[in-house]
Image (cartoon, grey):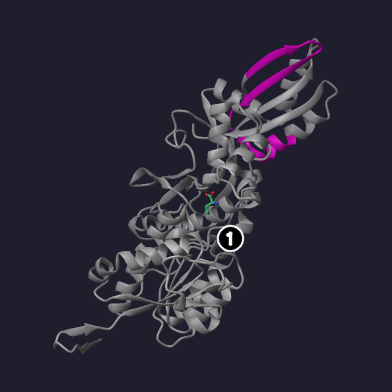
Amino acid sequence: MTSPSPNGQPVLEPLRVAMLGCGVVGSEVVRLLTDQASDLQARVGRPLELVGIAVRRLNRTRPGIDPSLFTTDAEALVRRPDVDLVVEVIGGIEPARSLILSALGNGASVVTANKALLAEDGVTLFAAAEKAGVDLYFEASVAGAIPIIRPLRESLVGDEVTSVIGIVNGTTNFILDKMDTDGAGFAETLAEAQALGYAEADPTADVDGFDAAAKAAILSSLAFHSRVTSADVYREGITEVTSTDISSARAMGCVVKLLAICQLSPADPDHPERERTVSVRVHPAMIPRSHPLASVGGAYNAVFIESQFAGRLMFYGPGAGGAPTASAVLGDLVTVARNRLRGAAGPGESSYAARPVSPIGNVITRYHLSLEVADVAGVLATIAQCFAEHGVSIQTVRQQGREADAQLVIVTHRASDAALSATVEALRGLDVVRDVTSVMRVEGE
Ligand code: HSE
């Protein structure tokens, strides 16, 4: 829509943007919207006008932002009849879900960075966007600035993605990388990461793997055209990883990473009627130093995709932070603005394949175990027998004597998680086994 200006030139009617939240990411989105206004207008074809920012408290100073934009009435903001686009960067389940649903119901397109909400209840949001014929975009929800949602949703939609393996949490990657470099333990490295601002004061969501699990649910839903929620994701964090695990990995030419692993089971040519399943898990794992993900250091993220026709693809970059995440939000904002002007909407939910999620017990991989055992004749034979009874084949055994006791490090061939768990339980019941001090999966070979 245009209207004449005093000099006769048409004035372009802006697309009006409402923001929910103005924290680290939100304030960068506001800055970029302001600083890049003329370029954004050229790219969209209309100005993007910020008309309001909903915040919890008005009394915080937010330098450089017009104070008249702030409101504490988020519901009224998203229900304004003139709002075209809503950016949600408050995070969490409520009130974000209700506000996004109000915005979509009001006919606005929504850009969100909210991984927890998408992973828990994306289905409700997608249905509301579909009903309203508007867009729901969420590039910033996984791996910050790294373009990974659009590649899965659009670029690779003609291919068959078989595996997505990601380092999708910068805090834990920073901690594990530092433990590897410095030889320090988890607790002291976490404290250092907190002091440096890499880890939150309450690091639970990161170190216990909840953040990565939400991202894994989103990635696997897109990759396998199926609904996967955070409750479907098997999750272990990094709090139990010890400096001994890290040095043992090093001795094997490996490094320890917190991985989000999303896999599609292979088709069985002899039984084409057999349903293919997805498995989605987040846990620390040893990967060879030659693996493309092994060299991802510090707080960086990376996602490694394997697909039937494209082969192997690697996406790498900053996975968090104000400006990088705002870059992903702005990319979505321009796209949904363009769609709106064309009277079109981008892709909605694709869950037609409806693949079942298989339990962790069915996962097949290799394992690294550390055991404290009595150093007496016949111990190795007893332990090897235990593995054999559960159908778990040993690849290597390393022993270090410690007076009456010894430490055994065993690496297995590929086995099911269920078989390995049963083996560990049986090992714990053996008189000669003092303790099973560590069990870690070995991936990437
Ligand atoms: N806390 C996350 C991380 C960033 O450390 O990667 C937001 O998902």
The residue most toward the left is 8
Say which residue appears at 28% left-offset and 68% top-offset: 40
Residue 295 screen position, x and y as percent: 44, 33
Residue 311 screen position, x and y as percent: 35, 43
Residue on which disc 1 sits = 229
Say whether residue 410 is magenta: yes
Residue 355 screen position, x and y as percent: 53, 58
160 or 435: nearer the viewer: 435
Left or right, 352 with respect to 364, comes to left
Q: How many residues crowd mark 1 within 10 Å: few (<14), some (14–19), many (20+)?
A: many
Relative to 439, is 44 above or below?
A: below
Q: Is mark 1 within 8 Å of ligand 1?
A: no
Residue 267 screen position, x and y as percent: 47, 48
**Amino acid identity at mark 1:** Thr
Which image quarter is the N terminus in?
bottom left
Range shown magenta? 397-422
Say which residue appears at 62% left-offset and 44% top-offset: 362
Can the viewer see residue 274? no
- Residue 180 is drawn in which quadrant? top right
Left or right, 375 with respect to 10, comes to right
- Residue 3 is drawn in which quadrant? bottom left
163 or 440: nearer the viewer: 440
Can the viewer see residue 49? yes
The residue most toward the right is 431
349 or 327: nearer the viewer: 327
